[in-house]
Amino acid sequence: MLTIEKRYHMILVIIITIRDETMLRRALESGWGIVVPGIIVAVLSLADLSVDAWRGVIVLGLLLTPVMLYHKRWRHFVLLPSGVALVGAMMLMLVNLKMML
């Protein structure tokens, strides 16, 4: 028969196990927030966009980020537009570097 202390210990172990699974899932979800925008920008880079178009992509990503942050359902995907803006800025730097060389 389990004592009260052992029952509390078992409950604590179950809670920690569930919490760790949730934390791992959240970490993986945040990884998708930069992988998906990276794929989107890679596809856009195949279209050979101009410098102004890349600036438009960055501005659109930066403007969508606070909109998605304050929307009840969209806030879970807030990393998508900010990730597009980040990776788009990296692509813009590469395009500028390519033009200078």
Image: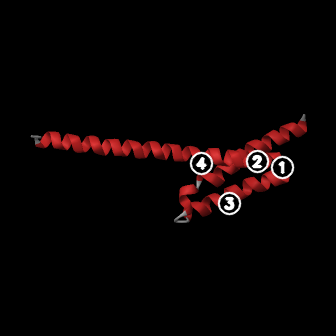
Of badges 3 and 2, the one in the foreground is 2
Amino acid type for the residue under numbered disc 1: Ala
- In front here: 60 or 47? 47
Calculate the distance from the C-alpha at mark 4 to the C-alpha at mark 2.
Answer: 16 Å
Calculate the distance from the C-alpha at mark 3 to the C-alpha at mark 2.
Answer: 21 Å
Question: Is there a contact, CB below 8 Å, between mark 1 and mark 2?
Answer: yes
What is the secondary structure assignment of the residue under circle 4? helix
Calculate the distance from the C-alpha at mark 1 to the C-alpha at mark 4.
Answer: 22 Å
Amino acid type for the residue under numbered disc 4: Gly
Of mark 3 and mark 2, the one earlier in the sequence is 2
Q: Quadrant of residue 1?
A: top left
Residue 60 percent across, percent down from the top left: 72, 58
- In front here: 93 or 74? 74
Q: Which residue is mark 1?
A: 47
Location of the C terminus by quadrant is top right
Q: Which residue is mark 2?
A: 43
Residue at x 30% of width, y 45% of height: 15
Label 1 CA crowd tier, 10 Å (few <14, some 14–19, many 20+): few
Q: Which residue is mark 3?
A: 63
